């Protein structure tokens, strides 16, 4: 961002470039945390898609399990 501001002060670029640099700078931490979380949510989605997380022989009825033989 400092480079964009310096170029603006020298008249080499428009203020829009400074704003764009600020936008990238402030969005970077959010993008990083989202990217770090994606593999975890992807694993959970894959696990659920493959049938994980529940037992097909057990059905809950009014909070009590009923076992199907």
Image: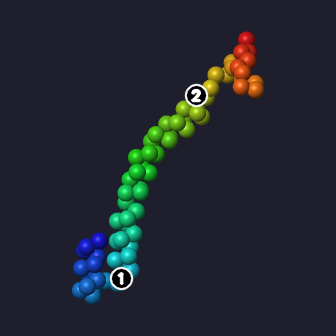
What x and y, as percent, mark residue 21?
A: 34, 71
Mark 1, Cα crowd under 10 Å, few <14 / some 14-19 / many 20+, is some
**In the image, what residue occupies the spot 71% across and 25% down?**
63
Mark 2 or mark 1: name the one nearer the start of the chain. Answer: 1
**SS class of the residue under badge 1?**
helix
User: In which quarter of the view is residue 47 placed?
Assistant: top right
**In the image, what residue occupies the spot 26% across and 85% down?**
9
Of 12 and 44, which appears nearest the observer?
Answer: 44
Q: Quadrant of the N terminus?
A: bottom left
User: In which quarter of the view is residue 29 placed?
Assistant: bottom left
**SS class of the residue under badge 2?**
loop
Height in image: 54 above or below 28? above
Residue holding disc 1: 15
Q: Quadrant of the C terminus?
A: top right
Tell which residue pokes out farthest to the bottom in this image. 11
Distance from disc 2 to disc 1, alpha carbons, whole Å, reads 52 Å
**In the image, what residue occupies the spot 71% across and 15% down?**
67
Whether tag 2 and tag 1 are in contact, CB under 8 A, the answer is no
Number of disc labels: 2
Mark 2, Cα crowd under 10 Å, few <14 / some 14-19 / many 20+, is few
Scheme by which the image is coloured: rainbow
Tell which residue pokes out farthest to the front in this image. 63
The reply, left or right, for residue 19 in relation to residue 55 is left
Height in image: 18 above or below 54? below
Residue holding disc 2: 52
Height in image: 49 above or below 68? below
What x and y, as percent, mark residue 24?
A: 37, 66
């Amino acid at each position: 961002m400092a480079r964009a501001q310096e170029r603006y002060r020298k008249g080499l670029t428009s203020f829009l470039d400074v704003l764009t640099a600020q936008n990238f700078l402030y969005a970077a931490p959010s993008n990083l945390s989202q990217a770090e979380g994606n593999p975890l949510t992807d694993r959970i989605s894959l696990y659920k898609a493959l049938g994980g997380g529940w037992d097909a022989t057990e059905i809950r009825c009014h909070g009590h399990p009923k076992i199907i033989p």
